[in-house]
Image: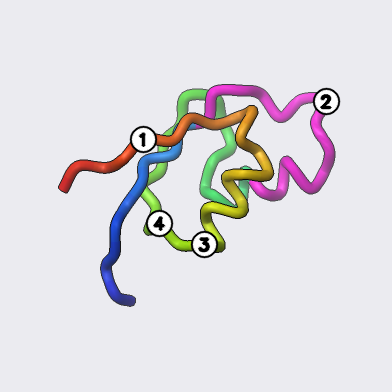
Amino acid sequence: MAEGKKIKVTQTGSPIGRTDDQRATLIGLGLNKVRRSRELVDTPEVRGMINKVRHLVRVEESVG
């Protein structure tokens, strides 16, 4: 897989009381606990997933 620009996504909110598709989106991003982080390649697909749960995550530009 070609390496591209990366972003760091950190879960800041709990999925308790959220819809099943929002829970599944967090799992798809590799997040399942508050304050857990993942470094992901910045693609339109990943951005769409982040947009769906933007109230539960924090996004930062990854250095390096």
Quadrant occupied by the N terminus: bottom left
On screen, 49 above or below 62? below
Does the residue at mark 2 contact the one at mark 4 (Cβ under 8 Å)? no
Alpha carbon distance from label 2 to label 1: 26 Å
Name the amino acid, label 2: Gly
Residue 44, labelled with which disc?
A: 3
Pointers 2 and 1 in contact (CB under 8 A)?
no
Say whether disc 3 or disc 2 marks the residue closer to the N-terminus.
Answer: 2
Q: Which residue is mark 1?
A: 60
- Residue 2 lies in the magenta-colored region: no
Marks 2 and 4 sit apart, C-alpha to C-alpha, by 28 Å
Which residue is located at x 15 percent, y 48 percent? 64
Residue farthest bottom in this picture: 1
Left or right of 43 on screen, residue 39: left
User: In the image, is 2 to the left or to the right of 10?
Assistant: left
Residue 58: x, y in percent?
48, 30
| Residue at x 80%, y 31% (from the top left corner) | 18
Q: Nearer the viewer, residue 14 or 46?
A: 46
Please name the residue that numbered disc 2 is placed on.
Answer: 17
Query: What's the mark number on residue 42?
Result: 4
Q: Earlier in the sequence, mark 1 or mark 4?
A: 4
- Which mark sits nearer the N-terminus, 3 or 1? 3
Q: How many marks?
A: 4
SS for callout 1: strand
What is the CA distance from the residue labelled 3 to the residue labelled 1?
16 Å
- Amino acid at pointer 4: Asp
Among the 4 quarters of the image, the one containing residue 31? top right
How many C-alpha atoms fall within 10 Å of the one at disc 1: few (<14), some, or many (≥20)? few
Q: CA distance from mark 4 to mark 3?
A: 7 Å
Q: Which element type, helix, strand or loop, lies under badge 4?
A: loop
